[in-house]
Amino acid sequence: MSRVAGILASRQLNGQFSRRLLPLLALFLLYFPLALISGLCHETGHGVVSLITGGTFTGIIMSGRQMEMLGAVRSPIVSIGGWLGQYAIAVVVILISRKYTPKSFAGRSIDLLLVLINLIEPPAYAASLQGDSQGVISSLTGYVGLAASIAIIETVAVASLLTGIYISLRFSYAYFSVVFPWMSRKRTNLTSYLFVAIYTTLVLFGYMGGSIGFNLSSNLVGSMLVFLALLLLFGFVLIPRLALGYPMKKNIVSIGAFSVIGIISIFVLLVYVLASYMPITIIF
């Protein structure tokens, strides 16, 4: 009898891991390759606007997790190209998902993260009045003055951020309701709100936290520690245990899919580490 109980307990433990923690771990691992893709889209956006305004675009240089466009810039308006590049990929994902809802775990996770990253980070970056924002300020100052330029940027950034949060919440709710179908609607809403709120807070703090700021896009070790903490929070606190005998025919994420996600993420992490010692240049 004790042997049967032990087998049942082992199966229940495996079920809790594969159905609660494994999807979350896969989701967090996917962040790294998708953040890389989003960064490339950001710099490509700079490059495209540079070409439109009479400049050149010869490539992208990657140093650690920081990227920079290579080429001759002829206009400060090129600064907005990065944000446009990120918004473009988010809009494409939103439009495609309206007609073709992904059926696989990987497809749903990619949609959620691409929307979240590319709708939350650009307005946070703009509101920081650093980097690309300086180019926008210099473009507007000649027409409306410095104070009005800053006010315009901050107003647009806040409106864009609120819009991005609203859309991200909808994607998050749809995601968690499918990946963890045994959760109640109230718990799914709470999980979605906290997921988007925590990510938005981290991004805002990263861009606007000054010398003690933490940026998910540049701090590799820090971001991994944050994701580990979130894994424990969501996996053991927010997402309830799967009831014994819950009618679930198969795990939401297979071992094969998880292995592929893990291999891709490890490869991207190695690229980040390599780029921190030896900058990588992509020539077009």
Image (cartoon, helix red, strand yellow):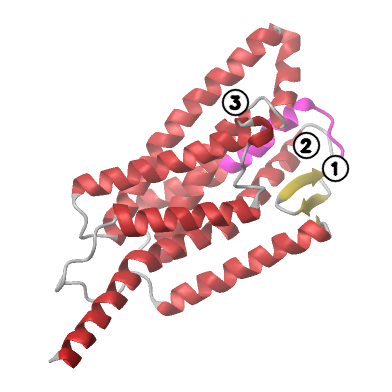
| Label 1: element kind | loop
Identify the image quadrant of the C terminus: bottom right
The residue indicated by pointer 3 is 127
Write down the quadrant of residue 177 in the picture: bottom left
Q: What stretch is highlighted in magenta?
A: 71-86
Badge nearest the viewer, 3 or 2: 3
* Amino acid, disc 2: Ser
Say which mark, if any, is on residue 142.
none
User: Could you tell me which residue is drawn at 63 percent across and 47 percent down?
Assistant: 217
| Label 2: element kind | helix
Q: Is residue 84 above or below residue 273?
A: above
Q: How far apart are marks 2 and 1 (CA)?
A: 8 Å
- Closer to the chain start, of discs 3 and 2, is 2
The residue indicated by pointer 1 is 71
The residue indicated by pointer 2 is 50
Q: Residue furthest right?
A: 72
User: Could you tell me which residue is drawn at 69 percent across and 67 percent down?
Assistant: 270
Measuring from the top left, give residue 274's x and y in whole percent: 77, 64
Q: Can residue 250 be seen in this view?
A: no
User: Could you tell me which residue is drawn at 40 percent across and 58 percent down?
Assistant: 232
- Closer to the chain start, of discs 1 and 3, is 1
Mark 3 neighbour density, 10 Å: few (under 14) some (14–19) many (20 or more): many
